[in-house]
Structures are given as C-alpha cells and as structure tokens.
Amino acid sequence: MGAPWSSGTGRLPDGALTVGGVDVRGLAAQHGTPAYVLDEADFRMRARAYRTAFEAAFGAVGTGVDVYYAGKALLTVAVARWAREEGLRVDTASGGELAVALRAEVPGAGIGLHGNNKSDAEILRALDAGVGRIIVDSLVEIERVARLAAERGVVAPVMVRVTTGVHAGGHEYIATAHEDQKFGLSVNPVGDTGSPAMNALLAVLKHPELKLLGIHSHIGSQILDPDGFEAAARVVLRLRADLAERSGVLVDEVDLGGGYGIAYLPGDVALDPERVAKDIAQSVAGVCQDLGTSLPRFSIEPGRAIVGPAGLTLYTVGTVKPVTVSDAGGGAEFVRTYVSVDGGMSDNIRPALYGAAYHAEVVGRSSAADTVLARVVGKHCESGDIVVHEVQLPADVRAGDLLAVAATGAYGRSMASNYNMLPRPPVIAVSDGASRVLVRRESEDDLLALDQG
Ligand SMILES: Cc1ncc(COP(=O)(O)O)c(C=O)c1O
C-alpha cells in the first residue's frame, strides 16, 4: 500500500487489510484489540537498508561505520534479536533497556549505554556486561564512572556527549550558540573557563580507569534534511581536531546519533538512507581533509527509522459521534465525527505530547460511502486523548469496525502507560502469514500486582 504503511501491508479484495500475510480480522479475533502489530520483515529490511547504505557510503570515503538500533523506540527481546541478526548493535538508555538487550544475547561489546543520570547500579551493570561504550553526559558522571570502574578493576570505554548548537527536526535545522537543555556538554566556551565539552574530554583523558573512544552528538528527531547532520558533524570533527592539538590524542570514533525521519501521513517522504549516508560521508570526508586529520570511524543510532513504519496499532471502534463545531474564527459551522477506539493516549502519547500527526483507516472491510472529516479519540478521561487529529474516514464508520493507525512502531509501546488503569496492549509480530506474541497483553492481575493494598 505504500507509506505510511509497512512494506508488507496490503488489502484483500473484500477490503480487509493484511500485514505480513495475515488478515487483521484474524489478528483481532486471536489477540484482541487494541494491539501493536509489528511487520518483522519490514523491520529487518529497514535495519539492513540503514546498515548497508551507511557501510557503502562510509566505505567509499575510506572509513567504517557501526549502526546502533536505538532501543528507546521499541525494545523487546525479539526486536533486539532481530537487530542483532541484521548486523546492528543496540543503543540502550537505562538499566531496563540494557537488561532486555542482554536477555536477547546481544554481545556486551555491541551495546551502548546512554542517559543523563545513570545510577551507580546501571553503570556497574554495564561494566559487568562489558558494554562497548558508556556515553557520559556530565563532569559528575565522568568521576562516577571512573570511581566504579576502579572499584571493579576495569577500564571503562566512554564517549562524551556534546551539544553542537545544531537542532534539527522536520525540514530544517537551526544553529544556536548555547543550548538550554539537559543533555550533553556544550562545545561553546563559557566565560574564560573554556568549553564544557573540551573540559570533559580532557577530564576523561586524565583517568587511567577510562578509555576515551570518541565524541557523541545527537541533534533531534524526525529529521528530513541531511544538512543538520552535516552541520553537527563539522562541529564535532573540529572539536576532535582541537582536542588532538591540546592533548595529542586524536579520538577514533564519532557518533552522529539518531533522528532519521519517516513518513507518518500519506504523501510524506521519508529520509532516504542511501542519500543521507552519501551526503554525510562525503561531507565528513571533506571536513577532515580541510582539518588535516584522518577520518574517524563513525556510528549512528537510528530508532524510529527502523521500527516506526514496521508497526501499526489495531483498534476496535466503540462509538461514533457527530459533533458540530465552529471554525477557528468562530464563523462557519461544520461537523467533525468523533470516532472512539478501545485504546488512546495510554498506548500512543505522541499526539497529546507533541501534537504528532498520524493516519488511520477502517481496515476490516471496504466501504463505498463518501468520507467524512473524523477525529479518532481514545477512551481516557481526558479531552486531549486524541489518537488522530484529522483524517477522512468512510461516513458509514460504525461501532465494531476495525481501525488501524499507521507507523506507530516507534515510541508507542515504549512510551505507553497504564493511565486510567488500562492494561497495555500486546506486541504481535507478523511474518510469512503467521502471528506470534512478542509481549503479551497486560491483565487486571498485572495492574494489581504491585499494589500492596
Ligand atoms: C542519543 C539518542 N540516540 C538515538 C535516538 C533515536 O532517535 P530516533 O528514534 O529519532 O532515530 C535518540 C532519541 O531520542 C537519542 O536521544
């Protein structure tokens, strides 16, 4: 069917949607709704596409690249295994994500640990697992990791997360001098104390318990233009050269983070991995030539671009209510059809949190009816409980219809909550005409399991 649906999505002659060769009516009957449905072949195809595009482009300019799947987008044991089997490493952002990656037998050396406030326990777990890199985020944390590495008698491999002043998202990037956010250390000097990023890099070098692998930069999410990555890479490579001048150490690796944008609506054009890989590779090669430094090895951390389009959420419509509203100017009246489904902001918080736009279709049948302007809403006690702000649905949409929302694979389940004590939906993988449960649906017993009465 094309974007924003996964590559394994189609329609049967009677109008029912299939994904991974499985009829969604069968999925609903077998697993219930709401349910997250994940097209395994689509996930694997995108993982491979990113790895091969970046390996080819960076290989062509004479260096290597590692692709880390950003587990924060969606991490289950099976998903981590798929990433590993497709030759990706796994980026984790907490002890819990680290535990999932380890349960999936991702080798420690292929795991990165992020976080702006890692606990001692998380750092120790990472050291014990022999993770390939801990991305440090503050001077306090550099001392903490050094102390814990000394306690364990190991040398901790670290990267320093820096902020370049480049923010990206959507179609543009903006460059600002100082960033007002919690992540990373700024490359820009503060008074006469130098730049926090340079100070952190020098602090790491002073510790025999730490090995400085390189510099990390993550500039934003849902980026649809490679310029932001190139601008950030320029800043990081200049910092790397400055560090070499100051310390004699030319670090081996630069990580450019994640943020590669996808299609959420029909007509959206996702960032093409081949194009962005080539643009970045050629740009960094030119920058290193100008700086007179060798090229480092690179790494990237895509999450959404791998798993977002592979997922859809399957709901059942419960109520349909036409509501007469006035347009923003208080003038003309029109009807908006509110379509309530059996999930909502607890299984996808992004529309409420960021105003994120999604696309929905009735997927259990065909309809010859005209379309109406609809808003898909959830069942929570919040008027902001919106699943899809605006979509054209058949005028005969009714209770009992199956409705699917496209491209919910990333940051749906991983940001899900139990608001209103709703059990979180299962994650169902589909592949080659069969479905299997990756994460089961929560039950009322699960909801009460932690309540001590
Ligand atoms: C450090 C880091 N890497 C990677 C990602 C993944 O971003 P995306 O899923 O947009 O590719 C994020 C997302 O917030 C991040 O903070």
Image (cartoon, rainbow, N blue to C red):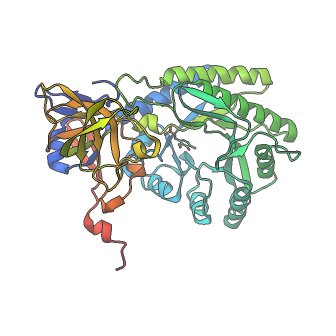
Where does residue 153 sit, x and y in percent of width and height? Answer: 69, 63
Where does residue 165 sit, x and y in percent of width and height? Answer: 69, 36
Closer to us: 259 or 436: 259
From this view, report whether residue 290 is shown above or below residue 162: above
Q: Please tell me which residue is depicted at 82% across the width and 45% down the height of the picture.
A: 190
Q: Is residue 59 visible?
A: no
Task: Give the residue at the far left of this rendering.
Answer: 14
- Left or right: residue 318 versus residue 426 is left
Q: Is residue 282 visible?
A: yes
Where does residue 342 sit, x and y in percent of width and height? Answer: 24, 50
- Left or right: residue 37 versus residue 96 is left
Q: Please tell me which residue is depicted at 62% across the width and 65% down the height of the picture.
A: 120
Dividing the picture into quadrants, the one containing residue 334 is top left
Q: How many marks?
A: 0
Where does residue 171 sit, x and y in percent of width and height? Answer: 53, 26
From this view, report whether residue 226 is shown above or below residue 425: above
Task: Give the residue at the far right of this rendering.
Answer: 192
Q: Please tell me which residue is depicted at 57% across the width and 26% down the height of the picture.
A: 172
Closer to us: 278 or 323: 323
Q: Quadrant of the C terminus?
A: bottom left
Dividing the picture into quadrants, the one containing residue 317 is top left
Q: Please tell me which residue is depicted at 26% across the width and 66% down the height of the picture.
A: 444
From this view, report whether residue 196 is shown above or below residue 145: above
- Left or right: residue 341 versus residue 13 is right
Q: Quadrant of the N terminus?
A: top left
Dividing the picture into quadrants, the one containing residue 429 is top left
Task: Give the residue at the far bottom of this rendering.
Answer: 453
From this view, report whether residue 196 is shown above or below residue 440: above
Closer to us: 225 or 124: 225
